[in-house]
Amino acid sequence: EKEGFQHYMLKEIYEQPRALKSTMAGHLDEAAGKVTFPGLRLTAEELKEIDKIFIVACGTAYYAGLVGRYAIERLTQIPVDVDVASEFRYQRPLVTAKTLTIVVSQSGETADTLAALREAKRLGSKVLAITNVVGSTIAREADDVIATIAGPEIAVASTKAYTAQLMAFYLFGLYLAQEKQTIDPQEHATLIAALKNVPEQVEKVLENADDLRTFAEGIKDEKSVFFIGRGIDFAVSLEGSLKLKEISYIHSEAYAAGELKHGTLALIEEGTQVIALSTQAELHEKMISNITEVKARGAKVLGITPDSHIELHRTVDELCFIPTTAPLFTPILSVVPLQLIAYYTSLALGNDVDRPRNLAKSVTVE
Ligand code: M6R
């Protein structure tokens, strides 16, 4: 069933264009410049009442939530908090009837996420689930469901479910903005058009797989790999770092690039591998100065940046270009090289890529 791929993870990485198209199908009315959610039970009135959003999830789904926060706050100006489910459930969250809690879970069976859902409901919040399994416990107990149509995900390391979750957040964010009229209609239409293009742009990123394989083979013996980025790129860095650790077992950390000086820089020495994401034009200069700082301490740097930002080649050792899209949507493109790096590193090390040690696909106990 791997359809010619050596592992499920690689197959699932390549299924992303299709998963993204299926997840957005039926939601984008390009002619009218509108996003529709025919299945949503939350009424327009209820949506208008929302004054705060909590996003709660575990692991990769939590990292998708961090991107979701950027998208929803930018598009709707509603304040959003993101929490890991195992923290949320015990922290007495400040949830009211005007709070919308969004739980995110590929499997729909994660014990902590389910407990968080129940706690949010008990406190009077409406709960919307973003899940890949519509018959799951989380889907059944939530007030509303946005289904990611990624198809079954077998590999323990989540890939297509993550990008489909990002798509779900973008669609919901655009929908909320449209209903609450927090976005200029022209900008809304431009974003819809850009989002429609993203699946094809993922195909383009996949064409770089050979270069990323070569890069991965070169880092397989590293003791440690650091990921840096700012804003939305920091959120993606966290996901890239998790991917690498869970299947290659190489120590890795992700840092908000501006935090380097507050401690991490001490860990950078001659030859340390750094992966730097710089996808946001207004932050390029700041990233260039952070990259210069790590390079001055001997780091080797791979930069990941849109093809419109060629100046970065002067600062980094290696460059991986992603296609240019709306700044909000870059995570779907920038995570793909990180998935491929993790995959090929694990492969080069001879690890069991699809079933990494100590981990289960679905964590149904606390
Ligand atoms: O099924 P869920 O989305 O609720 O699972 C959450 C995490 O256990 C999961 O994303 C985990 O972090 C993955 N192994 C990451 O690749």
Image (cartoon, rainbow, N blue to C red):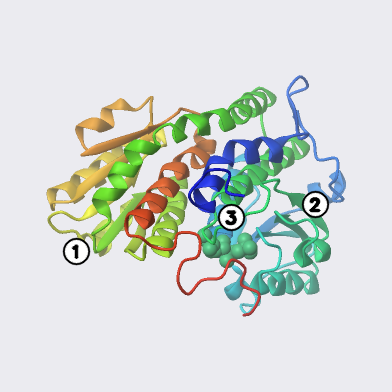
> Ligand 1 is in which quadrant of the figure?
bottom right
Q: CA distance from mark 3 to mark 2?
A: 21 Å
Q: Residue 20 or 262: which is nearer the viewer?
A: 20
Residue at x 24% of width, y 45% of height: 301
At label 3, the amino acid type is Gly
Return the disc, 3 or 2, that comes first in the chain's sequence.
Answer: 2
SS for callout 3: helix
Q: CA distance from mark 3 to mark 1?
A: 30 Å
Q: In the image, residue 29 lies at what x, y percent?
A: 77, 26
Residue at x 54% of width, y 62% of height: 156
Q: Residue 32 or 147: which is nearer the viewer?
A: 147
Q: Are marks 3 and 2 in contact (CB under 8 Å)?
A: no
**Of the numbered discs in the image, which one, if any, rests on residue 49?**
2
Return the disc, 1 or 2, that comes first in the chain's sequence.
Answer: 2
Tell me if mark 1 has few (under 14), some (14-19) or many (20+) residues whose alpha carbon lies within 10 angstroms of its own: few
Q: Kindly identify which residue carries mark 3.
A: 65
Q: Kindly identify which residue carries mark 1.
A: 266
Q: Is residue 100 left or right of residue 264?
A: right
SS for callout 2: helix
Q: In the image, residue 230 lies at what x, y percent?
A: 39, 47
Q: Residue 120 or 184: which is nearer the viewer?
A: 120
